[in-house]
Image: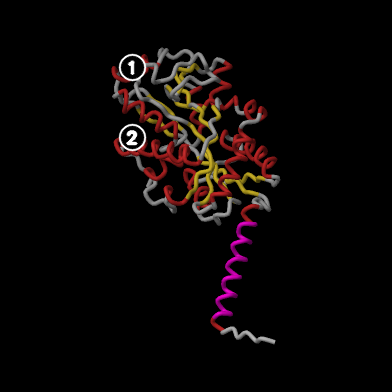
Amino acid sequence: MKIINISSACLKAAVVAIAGLTAAVAGQAAHAAFPERPVRLIVPFAPGGGTDMISRLLAEGMARELKQPVIVENKPGAGTTIGSDEVARARPDGYTLLMATFAHVVNPYLHPKLPYDTDKAFAAISMIGHSPSVLVVKPNSPIKSVKDLIETAKQKPGTLTYASQGVGTSAHLAGELLESLAKIDMSHVPYRGAGPALNDLLGGHVDTMFGTAAAVGPSLEAGTLRALGVTTTERSPALPDVPTIAESGVADYVLDSWYGLYAPAGTPPEVIARLNAAAHKAAGTDTFRKKVQGEGLVISTGTPQALDDYIKGEQARWKKVISSSKITLD
């Protein structure tokens, strides 16, 4: 019998190679099997709002596609940074997701000391959709249009008041953008939430506000508020007779209330692709479409790159608005 002598060095190299191959195969199998357990979807707002509702509907559809529960967890606070930070610090394995909104874009310019780097901490999965904010007044207001509002503000600088749910919110920045583009001066009145702001508008304590389609929809239907314009580039399917602010004479005016799905940075591409496909199918169902109509949501799912490109454009635009208005929360 021929005896083959194998040096300890060769044997060690062989063991290392086999171990590496085994790990690679195991890793591929783990990724191919994703998901093997429930997925968490972090919503950085309190339960009951528009973002919460849309997230729960999406989670239901994604759970059917992924064959695993998708559990919505509400982590409100600090202008969405508490929930966002939890996702930023999570393992990049696809089991912890974030439903991001308008705040995701503006927070880096409002909070210079964020606990994470927005550009580096997250991996885009898919845009879900866009919805408008609505500029509204009381039915008996002498302001009948966006043009009337601008003329009134120019005639009496600083006297026209607009409410918001707080400094740095979409409603506040919608007003700042209008002031900037129309070259007018209004007075911002911040509240601790959209409900109190809306109540004071209904009570006649402020002149106007920008509210989400869901928040002001019941009042518009009841005739206790009147819509002057919507903030999106196109008219809202939920309010087809209401002009956009841009078509009302304020060129380049646009503010989207958008919803985008993210994972922690470093999540494997194949897991991102699986989540992207599940989100597309969930948002494309008749059930989802019908239930989000009240939000005025225009569904626009796409690739991760498309979401990244959209966010870059929004960051550049809102950085300029926030800087020129000297808004800060720190």
In x, y percent, where is residue 7?
56, 84
> Is residue 184 covered in magenta?
no
Disc 1 target residue? 152
Residue at 67 percent across and 50 percent down: it is: 38
Query: For the stretch drawn in magenta, what is the main secondary structure?
Result: helix
Q: What element carries label 2?
A: helix
Which residue reaches farthest front? 1
- The amino acid on which the numbered mark 1 sits, given as a three-letter code, is Thr
The earlier-in-sequence mark between 2 and 1 is 1
Residue 136 falls left or right of residue 66: left
Looking at the image, residue 9 lies above or below residue 107: below
Residue hosting label 2: 321
Q: Give the residues in magenta.
A: 10-29
Q: Residue at x 41, y 12 (%)?
A: 142
Q: What element carries label 1?
A: helix
Seen at 52% across and 45% down, the residue is 262
